[in-house]
Image: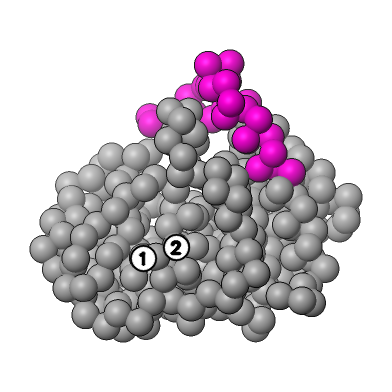
Amino acid sequence: MSTTHPMLNIAVKAARRAGSIINRASLDLDLVKVSKKQHNDFVTEVDKAAEATIIETLLTAYPEHAILAEESGQSWTSTPANEQPDYVWIIDPLDGTTNFIHGFPQYCVSIGLAHKGQMTQAVIYDPTRNDLFTATRGRGAYLNDKRLRVSKRTKMADALLGTGFPFRDLSTLDRYLGMFRLMTEQSAGLRRPGAAALDLAYVAAGRLDGFFEIGLAPWDIAAGSLLVTEAGGLIGDFQGDADYLYTGNVLAGNPKIFAQLVQTLGSKYPKVNLS
């Protein structure tokens, strides 16, 4: 990764700054103030501080760029399509807040850049392991300085899958548990570590062979989607289509496992039933 894109360099700087805030706070979790946005959806002062430093770093470098971020709610979506900015940063300052609050070391900073609606830069930073996942469109995906490739497993029976239970909207829980049962029967195992962005990074790194989840937000998916595709994987909704960023229903995996996920879950769970 000798010549990184300047926009990726700024995103890495922003992610590392946020990671420092998160790591400092993790040393004394009893002091972290927590509030509840809705059922099982928590926000801490750490999320807010991490997001503020990310936005400041990005906008200092690129003041004309727009921001779509989980905590601040800034968004370009209310402006008419012809007036929407070319560049939009899509940010989750702390994906896996519930894990963080409990000292369960599975959470990350996620920063993606969309240019005219297409993901072009991605950073996912795991501050507990100092794992830095990066991707630039057309230039591959990396973990620290090592090139990433998705796994080579071809059979679902051998595949380790990542997933996440619905937690905000529990109306989909029964439907989801049906998927969970089905994939438990068909795969080598399911894991639900609790930070979707990191799960997608793990698909890119070949640590997971596939991933599925429903009801995610754009900032959960944006950076991870580019990592997956730049590592040779595929990502889509349950029918394999490209509107996953806004429906929040996501399948990802190496090409063979992705195809089997679409075949298995897409037919049983059509679009209309998931949202």
Residue 35, percent from left and from top: 52, 22
Residue 272, percent from left and from top: 29, 63
Mark carried by residue 202? 2
Would residue 94 appear left or right of 253 to someone viewing this image? right
Mark carried by residue 208? 1
Colour scheme used in the picture? one colour
Q: Name the quarter where the N terminus is drawn.
A: bottom right
Q: Secondary structure at mark 1?
A: loop
Q: Amino acid at mark 2?
A: Tyr
Q: Quadrant of residue 267?
A: bottom left
Residue at 48%, 24% in the rendered image:
36
Characterize the local packing of mark 2: few (<14), some (14-19) or many (20 or more) Cα atoms within 10 angstroms. many
Mark carried by residue 269? none
**Number of numbered markers:** 2
Can residue 135 be seen in the rendering of this structure? yes
Q: Quadrant of residue 31?
A: top right
